[in-house]
Amino acid sequence: MNKAEYKDMWVYIEHDGTEIRKVSLELLCEARKLCDAAGEKLAAVLVGELPESEVQKILECGAEKLIRVSGAGLERFSVDAYTELFTQLCRKYKPSAVLVGGTIDGRDFAPRFACRLPTGCTSDATQLVYDPKTGDIEFIEPAVGGKMMAVITVPFVRPQVGTIRPGTFKYVPGGARGCETIEERFDFPIEKIRTRALSFRADEYDESLNIADAEVIVCVGNGLKGADALPRYRELAVLLGGKLGCTRPVFDRGVLPYKLVIGQSGVVVKPKLYLAFGVSGAVNHVTGITDSDTIVAVNRDPEAAIFGYCTYGIVGDMDEVCDAMIAQLKARA
Ligand SMILES: Cc1cc2nc3c(=O)[nH]c(=O)nc-3n(C[C@H](O)[C@H](O)[C@H](O)COP(=O)(O)OP(=O)(O)OC[C@H]3O[C@@H](n4cnc5c(N)ncnc54)[C@H](O)[C@@H]3O)c2cc1C
């Protein structure tokens, strides 16, 4: 394979017909930087209809090409149709990279079309770096339980496919650059769709479980004695105008839901204030909090790794420190 024949970095635009999922915009902004480093063009692949105000967001992230795909069988996400679509589009246009949000749909179809091409697909990178010597993207992510950082590349084939979790990168549009629109027609035979959505019922929306954009987060770790000890942390979060989050062991113990897990396999957060109670500071967790403005850690072990990441550290019993904070906040009210 001649890698030089493969040009342009693509971002798949995931949307629900009215709004673009934020992860796609985050990826556009990150891919913009990669394209600048590589001297390549940034292309967005949009399947189906979307209001023009949303399309404008794509342009403002600096996309230079917009591949708009319409056709039968694409009205709603279908892993069969989207896998075939991206296999064909990649064969036709030969992009150097395709970045897809690490959502339920993205994780479903990206490895499949990568496999059909065939090329490599990597998931959950927390950093993307363009290497000018090789022309490859380095997908960097914590490995071996966070003890090392793995640098994964797709050195011999193209495109380089990657799924990236929501919240990993920042959505900071750098401005429109002038964009060429390419219309593509693709009809996928309905009878070839093996898995079909028969109906759709949304989860009951619970705002307290949406922590990605919270400005204050009170995170409870495995030091938590049990569910009985939780109310004080909820109270502290409310007093600070924030939300509750947790580490993975707290979810594994069945104390809090998965949507509150922060870190590599959970949510990446960027609050102004992050309070960690009974959190050891494992890399898999810390990966999700490094963009916090201020980190306060409470741990009874003065050697805990979390103290290497925090702005302020308190050595002490988490419940006692939490109670003292609540008392102080109430005294000030
Ligand atoms: C592939 C992979 C992905 C992962 N993804 C994630 C992820 O997304 N998020 C995540 O959180 N983890 C993740 N993990 C798990 C991660 O490696 C750690 O095991 C986890 O983060 C540890 O959670 P913890 O700090 O709450 O628990 P522990 O490591 O058990 O630490 C508990 C801490 O509480 C302190 N403590 C105990 N009692 C008290 C007390 N009374 N007062 C004060 N301090 C006390 C202890 O000193 C200790 O430091 C992942 C692991 C793997 C292998």
Image (cartoon, rainbow, N blue to C red):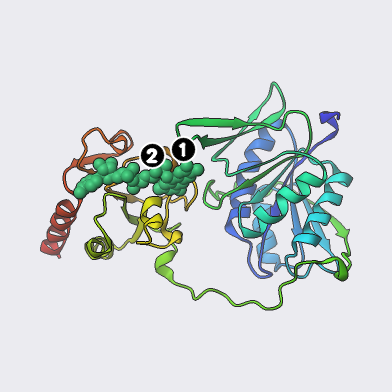
* Left or right of residue 262, residue 81 in this image: right
Q: Quadrant of the C terminus?
A: bottom left
Residue lying at the far left in this picture: please name it: 331
| Rendered view: 216 above or below 303 | below
Q: Quadrant of residue 19?
A: bottom right
* Left or right of residue 43, residue 250 in this image: left
Asked if disc 1 and disc 2 are in contact, CB closer than 8 Å, the reply is yes
> At numbered mark 1, what does the secondary structure look like: helix, strand or loop?
loop
**Amino acid type, label 2:** Ala
Which disc is residue 145 wearing?
1
Residue lying at the far top in this picture: please name it: 133
Front-lying residue, 101 or 317: 317
Give the x, y percent position of residue 164: 60, 47
Quadrant containing ligand 1: top left
| Rendered view: 106 above or below 196 | above
* Left or right of residue 282, residue 184 in this image: right
Give the x, y percent position of residue 24: 63, 54
Q: Residue at x 70, y 31 (%)?
A: 38
Which disc is residue 159 wearing?
none
Q: Residue at x 71, y 23 (%)?
A: 134
**Amino acid type, label 1:** Gly
Confirm if mark 1 falls within 8 A of ligand 1. yes
> At numbered mark 2, what does the secondary structure look like: helix, strand or loop?
loop
Give the x, y percent position of residue 307: 28, 36
Q: Quadrant of the N terminus?
A: top right
Dot 2: few (<14), some (14–19), or many (≥20) neighbours within 10 Å?
some
Which disc is residue 282 wearing?
2
Dot 1: few (<14), some (14–19), or many (≥20) neighbours within 10 Å?
few
Confirm if mark 2 falls within 8 A of ligand 1. yes
Of tags 1 and 2, which is closer to the observer? Answer: 1
